[in-house]
Amino acid sequence: MNGSRISRRGLLKGSAGAALLAGGARPAYAAFDATSADNTDVLVLLYLRGAMDGLALLAPISGADRTAYELARPELALPLNGTDSAVPLPGTAFGMHQRAGLLRDLYLSNHLAIVHAAGLMGATPTRSHFDAQLTMELGTPGQQSIGSGWLTRHLESATNLPATIPIPAACASASAPASLLASTQAASMPSGSEFRLNGWHWSWDDADPNVPTMTPAATRLKNLWSHGDALDGHGQRASDALAIIRPMDFGAYAPANGAVYPNSGFGAQLRMIAQLIKNEAVGLRIATLDLGGWDTHESEGTPGASWNYFGNKVEELAQGLNAFYTDLAGAGGANYISRVNLVAISEFGRRLKENQSGGTDHGHGNLMLALGGAVNGGTLYGTFPGLAQEQLFEYEDLAITTDYRRVLSEALIRRMGNPNLGAIFPGYAGYSPMGIFQGTDLTPIYQAPQNAVFGDGFE
């Protein structure tokens, strides 16, 4: 490595060390020129896969939009009266799903912000889950051949990080998402216990029970990468990452402030990320996780019905995010949430009009969520375009008025201290802050640097 550039040679050597880790985990490291004070914020990207129905999570409750909403959704519309009615957001013409009470609490306490009508701009509209997710995660609407994800390019272009970070990025999944495509700095682990060696059948820090005099794997691996060349550096960083993660007892982790995570895979992922954030030796700066199951073409669920699929998903989301915030708010001065910024996004919204199967089909615009101690919550951001037929995209779907990259760019600039938008989102221009995040406005840099991986030529 030379500064923040990763050469082709370095990339190939780094990939060799990847064989050490199982579950898709790779040697996690960062090497940057520290040209300014170290940034300690953490960006958490939550992908709501399957195209969440934003108009069922947050619905108009008055005016002409309410009339259009009820006409389009005679069965699925959030009601205005009764125990399952939409819960109004003060000072707005919108109400949240009744099962989103814990999300509303975060909103009312100014910790949660909601962005109207956000989504993919600058690309040919698509209703394909695969295409929309890939395009969003690459961060390059209009083309999918860039070869790296936007979070990868953020880490490569950041200049305000320590020279070495044991684990810059963690993916709560078996493999890294496309947003971290081509990264040699991300560790993938469905659970903390699965971040382990691949190749030894005995424990990381125990001797082989059949040969009790043998040196434990941890020590032998560390000795293996002790010759001082570049490849050894990659292996040493993998060893260091394992030495931090393996002693952590993820099963015994006790959330702070009485936080209760949902008893689901999503809840377990949030718990793990919270524990990694609290362990300062990890050095986490990026975390990714998914909550799937939002593709509600049929039986989406009628508010008040005995079985409400969408309501169950909303409750899981709300409980998880509320527990995550509560846990990281900490006690005794350990206010981790002040440097944690979570953004939730889905590939597109769902059609305004319900279908004949009790569900909704693929749409266009959707909402985004931002959660954190430095989020200016309690506000609906962006412009709601309206639900009259002439206001709809292709006369059927909620239009998009906010480019999703604008929200992410504000988080990168104000919270992560990285203004290199030309490197992170090639082709994106005209950024201006919406005021979602607190922080300093740096001048965006739109000129993309020379290709960091192949710029030194092929050898």
Image (cartoon, grey):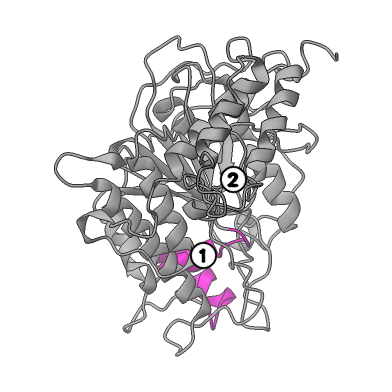
Label 1 Cα neighbours within 10 Å, binned few <14 / some 14-19 / many ≥20:
many
For this view, does 326 lie left or right of residue 317? left
Q: What stretch is highlighted in magenta?
A: 49-76
Residue at 45% x, 90% y is 306
Instruction: Classify residue 161 by image quadrant.
Output: top left
**Amino acid type indicated by mark 1:** Leu
Tell me the quarter of the image containing the N terminus. top right
**Amino acid type indicated by mark 2:** Leu
* Residue of label 1: 55
Lower position in the chain sequence, tag 1 or tag 2:
1
Is residue 27 in the magenta section? no
Distance (Cα) linking label 1 and label 2: 45 Å
Q: Where is residue 262 in the image (x, y as percent from the top left)?
A: 39, 67
Front position in the image: 182 or 97: 182
Comparing labels 1 and 2, the label whose residue is closer to the camera: 2
Tell me the quarter of the image containing the C terminus. top right
* Residue of label 2: 197
Q: Is residue 253 above or below residue 199?
A: below
Q: Is mark 2 on a helix, strand or loop?
A: loop
Is residue 54 in the magenta section? yes
Q: Is residue 282 visible in the rendered structure shown here? A: yes
Q: Where is residue 95 in the image (x, y as percent from the top left)?
A: 37, 65
